[in-house]
Image: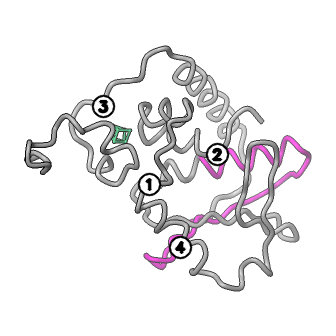
Amino acid sequence: MKYGGKYYNYLLVCPRKLWLYAGGLGMEHASERVAEGTLLHETSYPSRSIRYEELEVGSVKIDFYDARERVIHEVKMSDRMEEAHVWQVRYYQSVLERIGVEGVTAVLEYPALRHTERLGALTDEDRGKLEAMEKEIDRIVQADVCPAVPAGRKGICRKCSYFDFCFVGEMSDDGREHEL
Ligand code: SF4
């Protein structure tokens, strides 16, 4: 597979984040939010590893797959970027389809919100959108120059592992962030 699932997620979150991530500028090891997400995976469903399996297909890693029911389970902390989560999972469905597993469905799970979102099997429309997304990912990751910070401050930036990288120039001399 050409890309991992995060590429599809980040495409919808922020093109700059996608470009930085694709370039190997990973900051996620230093991100408290990523650490919180890892903890969530490990603690939300203690019995999960017995019921579901971890699946790796090329560069794609699906944390929880129910092979018997053909259901992908994707656990997220917040539903704020739900569209990005949906297309990350849609991509996983297409990856399984490419290796001959048809009719896979998915469940997005937000345990902290006690909310789940069910996704049916892929449609032709979904496949078309994924193709278009791959072209857009190609365009962004192959660009020589990092995309600019999107216009207007997005609340999502505060939770992003690249926040310091993108906004270091906006700190005061005393190290505090300027008013937003
Ligand atoms: S901090 Fe904001 S602008 Fe920078 S990569 Fe993250 S989401 Fe994009």
Dots 4, 3 in contact, CB < 8 A: no
- What residue would you read off at disc 4? 39
Q: Is disc 3 placed on a helix, strand or loop?
A: loop
- Residue found at x 86% / y 51%: 102
Task: Report the span colored magenta.
Answer: 88-117
Q: Nearer the viewer, residue 4 or 131?
A: 4
Kindly tell me whether mark 4's CB lies below 8 Å from ligand 1: no
Q: Which mark is residue 150?
A: 3
Q: Nearer the viewer, residue 81 or 123?
A: 81
Q: Which mark is residue 58?
A: none
Q: Left or right: where does residue 162 sit relative to residue 36?
A: left
> Which one is in front in this view, the residue at disc 4 or the one at disc 3?
4
Q: Amino acid at mark 2?
A: Gly
Kindly tell me whether mark 2's CB lies below 8 Å from ligand 1: no
Q: Which is more N-terminal, label 2 or label 4?
A: 2
Residue 119 % position (x, y): 64, 59
CA–CA distance in space, label 2 to label 1 = 20 Å
Q: Nearer the viewer, residue 95 or 35?
A: 35
CA–CA distance in space, label 4 to label 3 = 30 Å
Q: Which is more N-terminal, label 1 or label 3?
A: 1
Up-down relation of residue 113 to residue 23 (above or below): below
Q: Amino acid at mark 1?
A: Ala
CA–CA distance in space, label 3 to label 2 = 22 Å
> Which one is in front in this view, the residue at disc 2 or the one at disc 1?
1
- What residue would you read off at disc 2? 5
CA–CA distance in space, label 3 to label 1 = 23 Å
> Which one is in front in this view, the residue at disc 4 or the one at disc 1?
1
- What residue would you read off at disc 1? 30
Dots 3, 2 in contact, CB < 8 A: no
Residue 4 is drawn in which quadrant? top right
Q: Amino acid at mark 4?
A: Leu
Kindly tell me whether mark 3's CB lies below 8 Å from ligand 1: yes
